[in-house]
Image (cartoon, grey):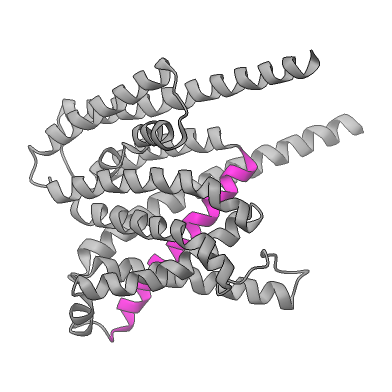
C-alpha cells in the first residue's frame, strides 16, 4: 500500500509543477501582449501613467491581502509589515527607486519595439550582472561564463543590426531596452541586500516596492507632461478604458505572483530555463500574431541569445554544485 501512495504523491507533485510552469508561461506571455496593447494601441501618449496604474493596482491588491490576513489569518496568508514605517522606508526606498527605473524602462522599451524583438532588446541583463557583480562586489566570473556573455552580446548586436533594416526598428526603444537590462541587474544586486531588512519576505518587499513606486511615478509623470495628456484623453471616462487598464494591472500583479511561485516549487535554475524557453515561444507567437516576416540572420540572433543565456545558466549551475561539494568536503576534513 505504501509504494502506490508514494508514486501517487510523486505524480501529484509533477502535475503541480507542470501546472505552475504552464501558468507562468501563459501569464508572462499574456502580460507582454497586454502591455504592448496598452502602451501602443490606446492612442494615449502616457506610458508612465500606464505603468503607474499597474503598480497602484498591485499596491492595492497587496494592501487588501495584508488587511484580510490580519482579519482572517486562517484563510488568507500575507507577511506582516507596514510600508509607512519610517525605518522601513529608509531601508527599502533605494531599492524602490531601482524598481521604478526598471519597470519604467521595460515598458518604454516595449512601447517602442515589437514584441518579437523585445527579448533581444532586453537580453543584456546577464552581461550587466557579470560586470556589476565584479565592479560592485568584487566577485570574478569564470572564463566559460564570460564566453557565454560574449555570445549574448554578439546575438544582441546581430539582432539590432537586422532589426534596423525593418520598419519596426526604434533606436530609442533599443536604448530603453539596454537601460532596462542595466536597471534590472542593479535591482537584482540591491535586492539581496534589502531582503534582510524584511526577514527575507519576497512578497513583503514587493508590497513595499509597489507602494513607494506608486509615489515615485507621480513627479515623473508630471515632468514628462503626462498629466495634461491623460486629462485630455478622449476616452478617459469610458468604462472600457478603465477595464483594460485594470486587466493590465492585474496581469502585472499576477506575473509577480507566478514568478515567485515557479521559483518556490522548482528552483532558480529551472525558473531561468523556463524563462528562456518562454522567451523563444513568445518570439515565435509574436511574429505569427503580428504577421511579421524576419530574415534568417534575425532568427539567428534570437537563437544565439537564447543559447548564450541557456549555456550561462548551465555553467553557473555546475560551478555552484562544485562549490557546494568543496564546502562539504572541507567540513568533513
Total residue callouts: 0
Q: Position of residue 308 (x, y in %)?
A: 36, 25
Whether residue 170 is visible, yes or no, is no
Q: State which quadrant residue 123 falls in.
A: top left
Q: Residue at x 26, y 43 (%)?
A: 178
Residue 256 magenta: yes
Which portion, as a residue range, is magenta? 237-266
Residue 196 magenta: no
Whether residue 12 is visible, yes or no, is yes
Q: Position of residue 231 (x, y in %)?
A: 22, 84
Say which quadrant the C terminus sits in: top right
Q: Using residue 9 as the reference point, say whether residue 240 is left or right of it.
A: left
Query: From this viewpoint, which residue is outermost toward the right?
Result: 1
Q: Residue at x 47, y 35 (%)?
A: 137
Say which quadrant the N terminus sits in: top right
Q: Nearer the viewer, residue 234 or 170?
A: 170
Q: Position of residue 174 (x, y in %)?
A: 19, 45
Q: Nearer the viewer, residue 306 or 13?
A: 306
Please identify the dominant SS of the magenta region.
helix
From what the image shows, is residue 189 above or below residue 44? above
Q: Position of residue 181 (x, y in %)?
A: 33, 43
Q: Residue at x 31, y 43 (%)?
A: 285
Amino acid at each position: 500500500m505504501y509504494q502506490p501512495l508514494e508514486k501517487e504523491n510523486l505524480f501529484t507533485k509533477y502535475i503541480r509543477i507542470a501546472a505552475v510552469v504552464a501558468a507562468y508561461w501563459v501569464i508572462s506571455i499574456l502580460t507582454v501582449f497586454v502591455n504592448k496593447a496598452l502602451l501602443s494601441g490606446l492612442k494615449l501618449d502616457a506610458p508612465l501613467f500606464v505603468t503607474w496604474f499597474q503598480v497602484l493596482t498591485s499596491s492595492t491588491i497587496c494592501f487588501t491581502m495584508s488587511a484580510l490576513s490580519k482579519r482572517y489569518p486562517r484563510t488568507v496568508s500575507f507577511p506582516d509589515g507596514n510600508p509607512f514605517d519610517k525605518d522601513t522606508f529608509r531601508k527599502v526606498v533605494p531599492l524602490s527607486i531601482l524598481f521604478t527605473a526598471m519597470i519604467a524602462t521595460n515598458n518604454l522599451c516595449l512601447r517602442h519595439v515589437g514584441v518579437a524583438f523585445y527579448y533581444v532588446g532586453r537580453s543584456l541583463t546577464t552581461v550587466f550582472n557579470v560586470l556589476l557583480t565584479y565592479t560592485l562586489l568584487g566577485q570574478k566570473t569564470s572564463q566559460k561564463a564570460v564566453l557565454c556573455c560574449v555570445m549574448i552580446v554578439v546575438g544582441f548586436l546581430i539582432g539590432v543590426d537586422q532589426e534596423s533594416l525593418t520598419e519596426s526598428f526604434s533606436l530609442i526603444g533599443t536604448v530603453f531596452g539596454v537601460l532596462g537590462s542595466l536597471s534590472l541587474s542593479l535591482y537584482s544586486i540591491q535586492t539581496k541586500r534589502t531582503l534582510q531588512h524584511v526577514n527575507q519576505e519576497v512578497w513583503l518587499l514587493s508590497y513595499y516596492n509597489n507602494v513607494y513606486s506608486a509615489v515615485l511615478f507621480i513627479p515623473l509623470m508630471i515632468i514628462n507632461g503626462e498629466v495634461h495628456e491623460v486629462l485630455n484623453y478622449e476616452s478617459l471616462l469610458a468604462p472600457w478604458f478603465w477595464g483594460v487598464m485594470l486587466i493590465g494591472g492585474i496581469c502585472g500583479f499576477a506575473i509577480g505572483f507566478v514568478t515567485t511561485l515557479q521559483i518556490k516549487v522548482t528552483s532558480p535554475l529551472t525558473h531561468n530555463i523556463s524563462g528562456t524557453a518562454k522567451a523563444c515561444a513568445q518570439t515565435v507567437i509574436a511574429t505569427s500574431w503580428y504577421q511579421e516576416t524576419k530574415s534568417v540572420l534575425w532568427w539567428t540572433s534570437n537563437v544565439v541569445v537564447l543559447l548564450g543565456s541557456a549555456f550561462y545558466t548551465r555553467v553557473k549551475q555546475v560551478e555552484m554544485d562544485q562549490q557546494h561539494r568543496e564546502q562539504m568536503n572541507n567540513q568533513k576534513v
